[in-house]
Image (cartoon, rainbow, N blue to C red):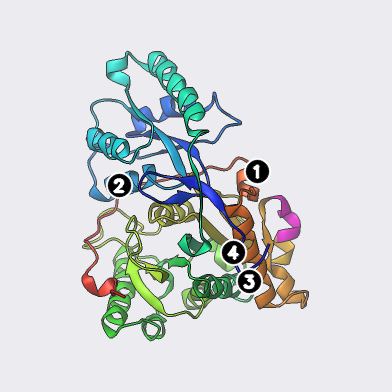
Amino acid sequence: MSLSGKSEIIGYERADGRVGIRNVVVIAYLVECAHHVARRIAMYFPDDPVHVIGFSGCYPNSYADKMMNALCTHPNVGAVLLVSLGCESFNRNRLLANIEASGRPVRLVGIQSTGGTGHSITEGKAFVQSALSEIAHVPRAVLPFEDMIIGVVSGGSDATSGLTANPAAGRAFDKIVEMGATAIFENTGEMIGLEHHMAGRAVTAELGNELIEAVNKAARYYSIMGHGSFAPGNAEGGLTTLEEKSMGAYCKSGSAPIVGMIKPADRPGRKGLYLMDIVPDGEPRFGFPNPNDIWEMNELIASGAHCVLFTTGRGSVAGSAISPVIKICANPETYRRMEEDMDINAGKILYDEATTDQVADEIVEKIIRVAHGEMTCSESLGHQEFVLGYKSFEPIGPACLPVG
């Protein structure tokens, strides 16, 4: 597979013109009370691309609403079953209308109106069976590599992460941007102390100021909450400070110019490299702004990521619903123990068995193969982790998305 990305990727064409690399049926519960029914429906389809996502809260939240609307109309999604209890505050009818307008098969099952658990499972199962048959005939279309969106997160970092996997992912991001595609990195809470360096890569001074303010906001949030993005597992893995972890995490962004900053479920307005600001706006209300790696992956996917790179030193088994996750292992010892969960062994760099650039090429080649349909390790093992909670964001300002 050539790094040029010119070998044709044939994806799944959606009515809005976007093209996906997967064709899944999403079962989306709209309150925790509907989670069991959604999960039971999915259990009837263990060998089919049926993924469960959902929002557990009953109190309305504009962020969760935006996320669910974006995820249910993601280009990797072919059809959607909405599972509602019936008395939750989520705007289910608007979500239903938006999915219908996107041209996807969709059905809303209301547990209270349908007659309870058993009746709802029966109705939902029938729809999923029908939807799987219908989306098998979705038109296929060429997906140019430059139309792809790729995200990156890190999790379970250790002392090797900043030496191998993260720099290799960053170099891969440089290559992805050079090839004309869109790349998104995130986690402003792990950029503290690096904000001015990052701002120097912004394509405009105004954007640079926005990047600095986003990191300052994260620092304020952490200060008020009394903790930062540094876990006991990081220390056990040999990291000593948040600054040390942050420098390694920042490497994932590579060295390309930063063309914009987005917030979760915002779609990039032009091609290039973006920072995603995942820390809520306003005064802290909903706890830890960076609760876990899976939540971060969901936010990248909601912004259109066809697939997500996941770097790890300690080891992680997490995958995701909707979009494939490519695991890049930083530590060669971890890779040996957990090879079945890892797609790329970046630990080779430590033993001079490969250069950073060679591992970056391996990552880009893997992205292309996955776009062609090759399953990642997490997909093969059946991982479809998903989590979504409460946050609060203000819309991005004009300085965050330079025109051009």
Residue behind mark 1: 380
Q: Nearer the viewer, mark 3 or mark 2?
A: 3
Please rate how many residues cluster around mark 1, counting C-alpha atoms within 10 Å: few if below 14, some from 14 to 19, many from 20: few
Among numbered discs 3 and 2, the one appearing first in the sequence: 2
Q: CA distance from mark 3 to mark 2?
A: 34 Å
Residue behind mark 2: 64
Among numbered discs 1 and 4, the one appearing first in the sequence: 4
Height in image: 79 above or below 341? above
Kind of residue sitting beneath label 4:
Lys
Q: CA distance from mark 2 to mark 4?
A: 37 Å
Residue behind mark 4: 6
Q: Is residue 339 magenta?
A: yes
Count of numbered marks: 4
On residue 371, the disc is none
Kind of residue sitting beneath label 3:
Ala
Among numbered discs 2 and 4, the one appearing first in the sequence: 4
Q: Nearer the viewer, mark 2 or mark 1?
A: 1
Among numbered discs 4 and 3, the one appearing first in the sequence: 4
Of residues 53 and 21, the one drawn nearer to the viewer in this rendering: 21
